[in-house]
Image: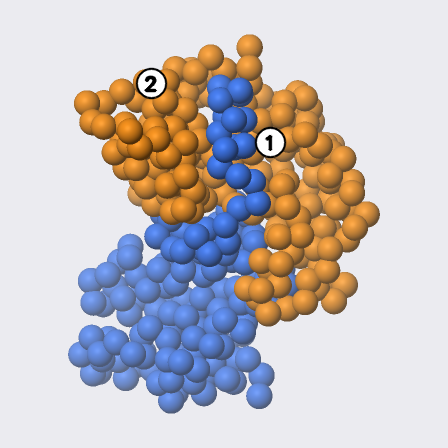
Amino acid sequence: MNIDSKLSEFFKNSDPRGLRSLSDQIMVEGFVKKDKKEIRLAVIAHSLSIIVQKDYYKKDKAYWDNFVSTLKTQLNDSENFLDEIEKEIVELDGHFGRYKENVLHLSRIRKGSTLYAWGVSLTLASSLVDVPEYELMKQIGRTKIVDEEGSQTSVESRLKVAEESL
Amino acid sequence: MKAVVCDSSSIITLSSNCLLWVFDKFDAEFLIPNYVKKEIVDNPLKTKRFAFEAMRNSMAINKSLKVVETNKELLNKIIELSNKLLSHKGRTIEIIQYGEADALALAIEKGLKTLLVDEKNTRLMIEDKERLRKVIEKRTGKSIEIDTDVSRDLEKMLKGMKVIRSSELLAIAIKRNIIDWPFPKREILKSVLTSAKYSGCAVSSEEIHQIIDAIEPHS
């Protein structure tokens, strides 16, 4: 089964774990292949994993049913499906009053932070997910990325350099 | 006069905490290349959410931060080498972009040895390429190879270069009473370094404790 079919399948089955693990899998491929399209797809899969597990998206049943059926069609047929699905996700959040802080944007920040954790520079991670560096840094600051990695250079020697350079 | 080259991440940390004024209090010049200016002023200025920060940064330009033109050939060489350093099954992995590379180019061109960089990956590329390789390998689960020739060339280009972060800059500012607020020094250090960390400065909690103890030991 190809990635698009898997995505479609997990979405139809409302499987957040499947979608999240697929998102990670696509991200790794996008990262090693330098493929921005795959990174966008990973962001979409991550957004959908959140959408399918939140009940409030399903409060307006008619709107939700329409979203599901539109997405199913787009996942299967559309050529420019990335643009269209992103638009649908943003509109879904807009329907519930979340405009700027929509799930797609939050997923972009999350995935940008993941790319940074993987070793991509801040500027590159920011451009791959189309999120300002400012926003990415705030997210990175909330994570344990740096605490997990440590540093080779001691604090004493870095302070000594600072003392001499400033 | 001493001079330090800054990348965008360190300026973002300081600007997010309204601490850009600290630059003026040191007896050193703080230089940025054009791409960094683009990242801290031109790009965020186009966004609704970060336009104010961009304006604040632009006020520091030509006052606290001096913009310096860099050699494009050198810049492209750094990007080319850095993005050929690591690979997976023969496919090279892109790790840096113009902003970071331009800061490195500026330092090399001017013969400056101190870089102010808050993001961890450019720092790792300068200080410990093998660790960077291991981080990528561990986090992605893919085997990552390092090109030893490229690594040697980069090593040569970046020889003697030292990285400090805004955490060290702020620690020195507190040590020298540049930040001299009416609170115990250890408390100021703890709060300012934690705030820098939360703004994205790649300093670990353990390092924060070590910095506090080094600057203001327990009495």
- Read off the residue under disc 1: B162
Q: Which chain is blue?
A: A
**Residue B73 at x, y = what percent?**
74, 32
**Residue designated by label 2:** B178
Chain B painted colour: orange
- Quick check: do tags 2 and 1 share a chain? yes
Inspect the image, locate mark 2, and give the three-letter code of the amino acid beneath it: Ile
Q: Which percent across, then down, holds residue B204?
A: 42, 47
Q: Earlier in the sequence, mark 2 or mark 1?
A: 1
Image position, residue A164 (x, y; %): 53, 20
Report helix, strand or loop for mark 2: loop
The numbered dot on residue B28 is: none
- Please, what secondary structure does the residue beneath circle 1 have? strand
Q: Nearer the viewer, residue B203 or A97?
A: B203
For the point 25% across and 76% down, the residue is: A54
What amino acid type is highlighted by mark number 1?
Lys
